[in-house]
Image (cartoon, grey):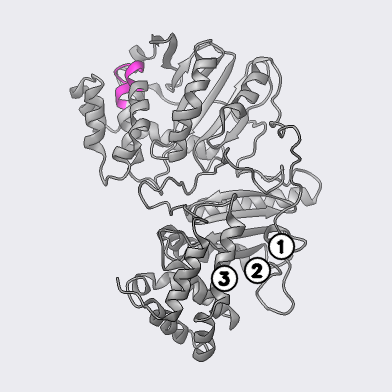
Amino acid sequence: MTRATGWGQKMRLGLLLFAGAALFAACGDDAGSGYEPITVIVDDSQSSPFPEGFVPNATTGTDEQPAFSPLDLSALGDNASASAVPSAIPGGLEVGFTEEGYPYRGNADAKVTLIEYSDYACPFCGRYNGVSLPELLTQYGTSGDVRFIFREFPLTGLHPTAPTAHVAAYCLGEQSPELYWAMHDAIFAGQADWTGLPDPAEVLRTMAEGLGADMTSFEECATSGRGEAVVDAGVADAQALGFNGTPSFEIMGDGVEGIFNIIGAQAVGFFQTYIDALIAGEAPADPEPEPGEEPDTSLPVWADTATGLRPDPDRPGVNMAGDHYKGNPDAAVVVIEFSDFQCPFCREHAVDVQPTIDEQFIETGQILWVYKHLPLAIHPLAPAAGAAAECAGDQGQFFEMHELLFASVDRWAEGDIDAEMVALAGELGLDSSVFEACYNGRDALERVLSDLTDARGIVSQTPSFVVIIGDRGSLMEGSLPVDQFVATLTARLEQAAEAAAGGGDSGG
C-alpha cells in the first residue's frame, strides 16, 4: 500500500495520535478483535450515559413465547436416548439433555431455568462462560436451584466457522453429556486457537480426541448433517424470540408468570438479581443503581429528538448536532448509523442493505436516517475517507460521496489516499478547489473524530445502529441481512405507532 506523505496526511496522523486510545474496537471480520458486531452488549465495566430506559434491542421483561421450541429427537441420532439420562460430573453438578434434546447442567427439576443462546466464536460469550458462569454454576447449579441450558446461536454472517464448533460439541454430546460439556468448555477456553482459522475442523478434532471421544463415531456424526440441523433449529428459535446478538438469555421460574430476557455478558450480580427473585417465587425487577448513584435521565444531544436531531436551518441536510441526515426530520423512528468507510461489514450494509432501506423507509418519510463516523484503529485510512465525505457534505453531496467511497474502497485503500479523495470529488462534480481546501484543512477531520467521543461507552463496533423512538432507544450491531433489517424496522414502526396511540411502551 502506498500512502501520501504531504502536509494533509501528516496532519491527519497527528490528530489520530491525539485521539490516542479513544477506540480499540475492531470491525467484526478481523479475527481475534475481541469485538462482536450483531452482538448487543451491556458492558458491566462501564456505565452508559444513556438513561435507564435506553436498553438493548431485546428488552428485559416478560415474554409470552414458550421456553422451548419442539425439536424432533430423531434428529439427534441413535445415541440421543442413552445420553439423555442425567448423570453427574465431578463437583456434584448434574448434566444431561432435556426432553427437547437441549444440553443442561444443574438439577433437571430445578425451580429456575436459564437458557443461554450463544456463539462459540463470540468473545463476549467466551467472557460469560469463563467469568460469570463458573460462579453461577457453583452457587446455583450444584445446589440444584437452577438448570442451565445451552442453545446454539452462531452468528454466521460474522463468524462463518462457528457452526463447525457447534457441530463438534453436538457430536460429542451424542456420546455422553459429560463429553458434551467438556467439549463445550474446551471450545470456549480455546477460542484463540481456532477462531482465526479458515477451517477449524482439525483443531476441534484434536480437542475431541484429547477428551477421549470415540473418533469413529465423531467423524460419522460430523459428516452426517445431524449437527447442522440442531444448529439451524437453535438459530431459528433465537431469531423467533427477537434475539439478534450473543449471548442472549431467557430465564423463568416455577410459579412465576412470564419469561424474562437478559442481554449480554452481564456481571454475576446482574444474574443473581433475577435468579434470587425467581427462587423466591417473585418476578424479578431490573437491578437498582448502586446507592448514591442517580440514573442519567437525558439522552446525548446527538440522540435527542428535541434538540440535536432537529435540522440545522443554516445547513441543509445537517442536524443541530452536526451530523448528516436523510429522510423525514419528523419521523417517529430515528436510526443513527455509526460506520467506518474501510470496514467490510459497513460496506456490505451500504451496498446490499441500505438501498432497500432507503426505498422502503426513508424515501417514504417513515424513518429519519442519521450518519455518524466511527473510524476504527485497525482502519488507518477511514478518518481520511470520513473527512472527504464531510467536505463533500459541505457542497451538499455527503451521501453521494458516502456511496462512492464504499463502492471504490478497493481502489482508494490501496492508492495515494489524498489523490484518490480528490479524484472522487471530481467524479461527483464538486468544486475541486473548495474540496481540496476543506480536505487539507483541520475542521473536516475534527468533525469525524468528534464522533469517537459521542460513541464512547455506547457503541464500539461497526456498523452499529441506534434506534430512537421518542426518548428511548435500542442498539443493533452488525450488518444484518436485508430481510432481517426490514423486519426489525417494521417492528419498530409498529412499536412507535402503538406508543403514539397510547397502547404500549416505546422502549427497546
How many labels sit on residues?
A: 3
Nearer to us of marks 1 and 3 is 3
| Label 2 element class | strand
Residue 176 against residue 302 in the figure, above or below: above
Q: Kindly identify which residue carries mark 3.
A: 446
**Amino acid carrying mark 1 in the image:** Ala
Disc ID at residue 17: none
Residue 142 against residue 62 in the figure, above or below: above
Measuring from the top left, give residue 353's x and y in whole percent. Answer: 49, 61
Left or right relative to 456: residue 294:
right
Q: Main secondary structure of the magenta part?
A: helix
Q: Quadrant of the N terminus?
A: bottom left
- Examine the structure image and report whether residue 475 is included in the region drawn in magenta: no
Mark 1 → mark 3, Cα distance in angstroms: 29 Å
Q: Specify whether residue 375 is in view.
A: yes
Q: Kindly identify which residue carries mark 2.
A: 327
Q: Residue at x 19, y 23 (%)?
A: 215
Residue 95 against residue 18 in the figure, above or below: above
- Circles 1 and 3: CB distance less than 8 Å? no
Badge 3 density bin: few <14, some 14–19, many ≥20, Cα 10 Å: some
Give the magenta-colored segment's residue range: 171-180
Judged from this view, the residue extending furthest toward the left is 216
- Circles 2 and 1: CB distance less than 8 Å? yes
Left or right relative to 96: residue 473:
right
Q: Kindly identify which residue carries mark 1.
A: 331
Rendering quarter of residue 378: bottom left
